[in-house]
Amino acid sequence: MAKHSDQTRGRWTLGVKLSLLVSALVLGVSATMALFVALRTAQDHRSAMNRQVRSMGQLFGVVRGTGSVRRFDPTLIRMFVEHAHEMGTGLCFVVLLDAEERVEPGSSFNVHLLREAAPSLAARMHTGTEQERFECILGWSFGEESIRTFRLHIKDKDGTTIGKVLFGFSTVEMDAQIRASIWTNAEITLAAFLFGLIGAFLMARHFTRPIRQMAEAMQRVSAGQLEQTLAVTSRDEIGTLASTFNFMTRGLRERERIRHTFARYVSDQVAERILKEQDELDLRGELRKVTVLFLDIRGFTTLSEDKEPREVVSLLNDYFEIIIDIIFRYEGTINKFIGDSIMAIYGAPHAIDLPEARAALTAVEIQRAVGEYNWKRLQEGKAVVNFGIGIHSGEAIAGNIGSARRMEYTVIGRNVNLAQRIEASTREGQILISEATYAKVSDIVVTRSKEAVFMKGIVEPIPLFEVVEMKANTIKEIKKLRQSGEKTA
């Protein structure tokens, strides 16, 4: 759980990503619209100015004198220029030229508008004759000034150029209107962005809350808390996900219940193997090298005849609870219960290291634990039992025995039968191991040799060894003991 939390720390949540995405879209759309409006406003102002220039050009063309020497009316021109501000035309100057580009009388300029739109030019025109002032206008570069110039050609009926007019219009007011339009659109864009950001956050919070709850529940499930359920509050995809999650956790809880139920009858390894099978369980089996341990209560038949069935079952369960815990601790697989007997396997269904040593440790610890438990029961005035344990190692057939409807994982063969017969030769509290097992644990056990025993179905007598005690009490100590022995050798 901690590792998973470390992986998600610093990560942008789905709500943040959705909020940023929607905000970016709102910002993009608003900015695009603002840019379009600003460009359209500027274009409209320029179009209006062009129309104004054409109108004035036509006007100046028709008001030119009709005498033999055709000239513009200077009074009319001066009126247009001096009253440009009141008329809203922004006309800063009009320079009249003849066909040879010479300044004609009647040219005029508006001092106020010129100072406002082109202060450098206005300062330059402060001195000098009137002719020099207009020639200064003709030679001026208006690149950095707020003035737009237009040059019109006045032509006769036959197309001959009879004069030219240079207009200068102030763009101060137009630029101010464009800037005001840009600022207004920027403010609208910012307001839309903030509104979109808040709306996106609220919307993302609304949509991602159930997803976040589901993610948190999934984290708890991954940590083993399978009781998680989600409330289904809608019929959309979120509701479908919540229903599917609840269905999944019910399945996981059922699977866990089945696994625990299996573990009450078979070992955890067998239960895990059954649950992990992807296809039909394999009935063919395999040959495995195993160590088989049988234990049985000595004199149980006589003991059970004097007790009630419930009391007999309770007695067995009390002892088996201790024994099963010890078998599992040394990675043994409880194959089956046969009345008052237990068959345990070391090396199937999964291979383990030191199976013979594990079986021997199991047997010694069981006898010690049973002895301590017997003393406790005697103090309480309860009946006690003692076990005989037989161990043998060798190859056996391991697999699922049965049919598709009912099967059992077990090991069968001569060596399994031999282990059971060795156990049958034991007395109460005794541990007997075969020669095959002794060969693997002779360096870690103290034994007493027994006379060879004839067993059913076997022609030659079987050498047996009684285990008295262990030279090491844990697998770790056994490994350490053997490593020191190897170094000494």
Image: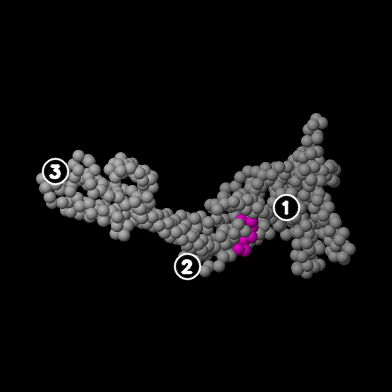
- Which residue is found at the position 59% from the left and 51% from the top? 10
Q: Quadrant of residue 41?
A: bottom left
Q: For marks 3 and 2, give the CA distance.
A: 83 Å
Which secondary structure is most common in the magenta stretch?
loop
- Please give left or right for residue 266 compared with residue 284 in the image: right
Identify which amino acid the numbered label 3 is placed on.
Thr
Q: Quadrant of residue 224?
A: bottom right
Observer-side mark, 1 or 3, equals 3
Toward the viewer: 23 or 74? 74
Identify which amino acid the numbered label 2 is placed on.
Arg
Residue linked to disc 1: 328
- First-in-chain label (2 vs 1): 2
Observer-side mark, 3 or 2, equals 3
Residue linked to disc 3: 160
Circle 1 crowding by C-alpha within 10 Å: few under 14, some 14–19, many from 20: some
Q: Quadrant of the N terminus?
A: bottom right
Residue linked to disc 2: 235
- Please give left or right for residue 17 compared with residue 444 in the image: left
Query: Would you say the residues marked 1 and 3 are in contact, meaning their CB atoms lie under 8 Å apart?
Result: no
Where in the figure is residue 232, as x and y percent of width and height? 53, 67
Magenta part of the protein: which range?
222-228
- Which residue is found at the position 60% from the left and 63% from the top? 228
Determine whether the residue tagged by mark 3 lies in a helix, strand or loop. Answer: loop
